[in-house]
Image (cartoon, rainbow, N blue to C red):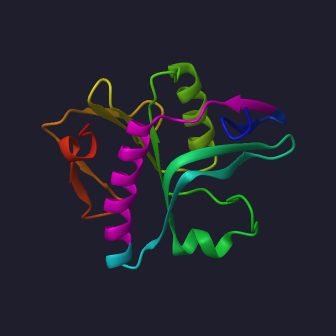
Amino acid sequence: MPGDAWDELVEGEIFRMSPPGYLHGKIEVRFITLLNNFVNAHQLGDVIGGEAGIYTHREPDSIRGVDVAFVSHQQMERAQSVTYLDVAPELIVEIMSPNDRWSDIMDKLEEYFAIGVKLVWVADPQRQEVLVYRSLVDVERLTPEDELKGDDVLPGFSAPVSELLQT
């Protein structure tokens, strides 16, 4: 049915994706709102969302849709594409949906860190946790009792995990 799916391009091959559910959307809006308020207040760059496409590989091309990302002014100045982001965001947020597979998430994380992403937050509403990836091997698990912090990417940013994952 038209409009019921979108695509990601992975090494030149098109993969059809199911659209996320409403809970995914609610949580995405929370991340975008909190990040955008902080980033705008400190004039740091741009927050993007809505499965915006970013290049993670060229020739063959890979274009991944990210749930939420922060891109500094310095990175945006280097961008050359007017369609998909061709510079690495400093931060990417991936929100797990019930049909997501961890192997697919790990593939994305590998691609993100390979292009220079510094921090990835993987929010899992079902498990009520956020996994903070500073690299593929430096991972911190946060529960609703914890505060999510921006580390060196967004110094001073902090948000309660319970607020972000509220269903």
The vertical placement of 167 against 93, above or below, is above
Q: Quadrant of residue 38?
A: bottom left
Q: Residue at x 55, y 74 (%)?
A: 74
- Residue 115 in picture, x, y percent from top left: 64, 48
The vertical placement of 40 against 85, above or below, is below
90 relative to 167 in the view: left or right: right
Q: Nearer the viewer, residue 141 or 160?
A: 160
- Residue 147 in picture, x, y percent from top left: 19, 46
The number of callouts visible is 0
The reply to whether residue 140 is in sight is: yes
- Residue 78 in picture, x, y percent from top left: 67, 71
Q: Residue at x 87, y 44 (%)?
A: 59
156 relative to 62 in the view: left or right: left
What is the quadrant of the N terminus in the image?
top right
The vertical placement of 12 against 157, above or below, is above
Q: Residue furthest left?
A: 145
- Residue 106 in picture, x, y percent from top left: 54, 27
Q: Quadrant of residue 13?
A: top right
Q: Is residue 97 magenta?
A: no
Q: Nearer the viewer, residue 51 or 155?
A: 51
Q: Which residues are magenta?
A: 14-39
148 relative to 3 in the view: left or right: left
Q: Residue at x 20, y 33 (%)?
A: 143
Q: Residue at x 35, y 59 (%)?
A: 152
The reply to whether residue 153 is in sight is: no
25 relative to 18 in the view: left or right: left
- Prevalent SS, magenta region: helix
Q: Is residue 19 magenta?
A: yes
What is the quadrant of the C terminus in the image?
top left
